[in-house]
Amino acid sequence: MHRASAFQNNNKNNKKAANNKKGLAQVFVALLEDYVLSLKASNRSPKTITWYIEILKRYLTFLSSNGLLKPIKELGRQELRAYIGH
């Protein structure tokens, strides 16, 4: 493979990964918004809601900054253990 082709393929892969990461972030934002509505419907206090959302945001930020962010159905023990151990 020529250098230019390798660079173009790498560049396409980087863009695809960035778009995928943005897409995942949008999905998680929507899920957090739904979760907030669910907590409000369950009559949770505003402080409880804020606390739960902050914990989830910290977890998602950790996953994102460590290259572990993936679709929610693919998250499991490995990612949770990495977060707890950091």
Image (tube, rainbow, N blue to C red):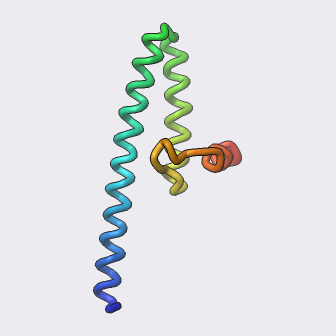
- On the picture, is 66 further left or further right than 26? right
The location of residue 23, given as percent across then percent down, is 34, 48
- On the picture, is 24 further left or further right than 73? left
20 shown above or below 1? above
Q: Residue at x 43, y 11 (%)?
A: 41
Q: Residue at x 48, y 13 (%)?
A: 46
The location of residue 11, given as percent across then percent down, is 32, 73
20 shown above or below 32? below
- On the picture, is 44 further left or further right than 24? right
Q: Residue at x 51, y 10 (%)?
A: 45
Q: Which residue sits furthest right?
A: 85
Question: Residue 27's image quarter?
Answer: top left
Tell me the quarter of the image containing the N terminus. Answer: bottom left
Figure disc tally? 0
The location of residue 68, given as percent across then percent down, is 53, 53
5 shown above or below 20? below
The foreground one among 9 and 55 is 9
- On the picture, is 63 further left or further right than 19? right
Q: Residue at x 35, y 58 (%)?
A: 18
Q: Which residue sits furthest top?
A: 43
Q: Which residue sits furthest front?
A: 73
